[in-house]
Amino acid sequence: MSLPDSQIDPTICRLSESRKPAEPCTIVIFGASGDLTARKLIPALYHLFKEKQMPPSFRVVGFARREKTDDSWRTELRAALDQFSRTKPVEDAVWNEFAKNIFYCMGDMTDTAAYTKLEQLLTSFGQTALRENLLFYLATSPSQFGEVVEQLHSSQLLHKDGPGWQRVVVEKPFGHDLESAMALNTELTRFARERQVFRIDHYLGKETVQNILMFRFSNSIFERLWNRDSVDHVQITVSEKIGVGGRGGYYEEAGAMRDMVQNHILQVLSLVTMEPPVSLEAEAVRDEKVKLLKSIRAMSPDDVAKQVVRGQYFAGAVGGEARPGYRQEAKVRPDSNVETYVAMKLLIDNWRWSGVPFYVRTGKNLPMSASEVRIQFRPTPNVLFAAQCGQKLGANALTLRLQPNEGISLRFNGKVPGTSLAVRPVRMHFSYDSEFGAYTPEAYERLLLEAIVGDATLFIRRDEVETAWQIVDSIRKGWEGKALSNREFYSAGTWGPVASDDLLALSGHAWHEPLMVT
Ligand code: BG6
């Protein structure tokens, strides 16, 4: 007997069933007055609570310098939630229940007495687990990570080996080059074990990014083609319509390479290209990612000149809206050479991918916000239809749309109906929303939950972050002392500098605009 697809029990393969239960715990947010807390962390915790995914008992403690009471902080957070919640309106009954668990601890991160106060607050919660199972979320400036962790350790709140469990979630940027990332790793692991450190990359919390592994390793038809025999090249685009806006100060130190490539893009690339892990355990998945990152061919400064294009936007318009040039943005040097766009050709020296170019690009003030991976397959031999119709046949392509309109599309050729022999590319689309409804949890919901249950699969391991910096550092070295050339500027609202088209044209390729499927 065969079952119609709609009757196949989805629980058969629900991975979350193997997830450990969420134990009672307290989440302490350092940098509680910041943007991240209001925009992402509290909305994520509220939704986890609403979906009944939080532990049976929990507390959220905000730790920051500004003077506030529990009540005034709750009021502030409620206003922010009304603005940033992904579900609207916020449900009063749910919020009121949730808010009872929120507390504020006023203190200076450098002051030992503040940690004693925090300890007293935790003890006042009564239940041992709420005092011992602690998730410290460092939403502070990176220069404070080391200090906070040291203070937590010396005030007996963070132990290397129990009682209970303590974990430290670290926001990006994790260092600004290999050396600083290694120094930070050494600092953190003086006071916590590597398994207690959860380095965040919010791209790993995105549903569609997680689906890359699921898609690859649960479908035999595609995985068979996922190698140099069938793939001509791969394009990864992460384009953004926004400019740097109010983040000029940060961006001057970062640039697109550190801001997007070192983390999000290399993460997506490694998920698309890694070998199947031996299991879904965190270490097995991360071992494969590191192995892949290590096989990305290192670039000499000469290679960088040939394989990497930087760009910076000048004034233009995005979707009809006027945008200033990067050098005119607040807190940006008027002669800045910081890149707001990067495109590059990467090669992976391993058995599977040898010789296949991977083109990646990311930039600000581009015509659309879209992230996608396009696997471009090899063309057919130029006989039969192509030769007969005098047409250049488009090759097959598989597009993984990460955002927006998350889904997967397959492009193939079809005959145009009628008596002629015309062939035209057509597409098969799968869309998350139409298949599963519009329920898309935010990346932070998934990541916070994983950190609470202690599953590190979606977090970056020490060797992973260091290998990624090694790749990025070698490229940045090739730029040292070189100002941007005219060919590396682009008008806001266009697809980046001309040099980026030339990069692909050299190998007979061209960028494809992200698919906007509605
Ligand atoms: C952040 C970068 O990590 O990712 C930002 O610092 C960027 O510059 C953002 O805009 C993009 O994230 P998303 O989820 O909007 O694609």
Image (cartoon, helix red, strand yellow):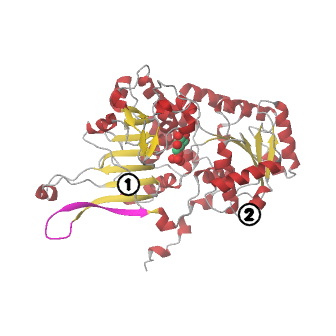
Label drawn at residue 92: 2
Give the labeled residue for mark 1: 515
* Closer to us: 230 or 124: 124
Give the class, few, some or many, for how many residues have Cα within 10 Å of label 2's Cα (few <14, many ≥20). few
Q: Is residue 202 above or below residue 174?
A: below
| Mark 2 / mark 1, whichever is N-terminal | 2
51 sits left or right of 180 in the view: right
Q: Which residues are magenta?
A: 416-430
Q: Residue 224, can we see it?
A: no
Amino acid carrying mark 1 in the image: Leu
Q: CA distance from mark 2 to mark 1?
A: 39 Å
- State the SS at label 2: helix
- Which of the 4 image quarters holds residue 28? top right
- The mark closer to the camera, 2 or 1, is 2
* Closer to us: 441 or 335: 335
Identified at 43% across, 80% down, the residue is: 1
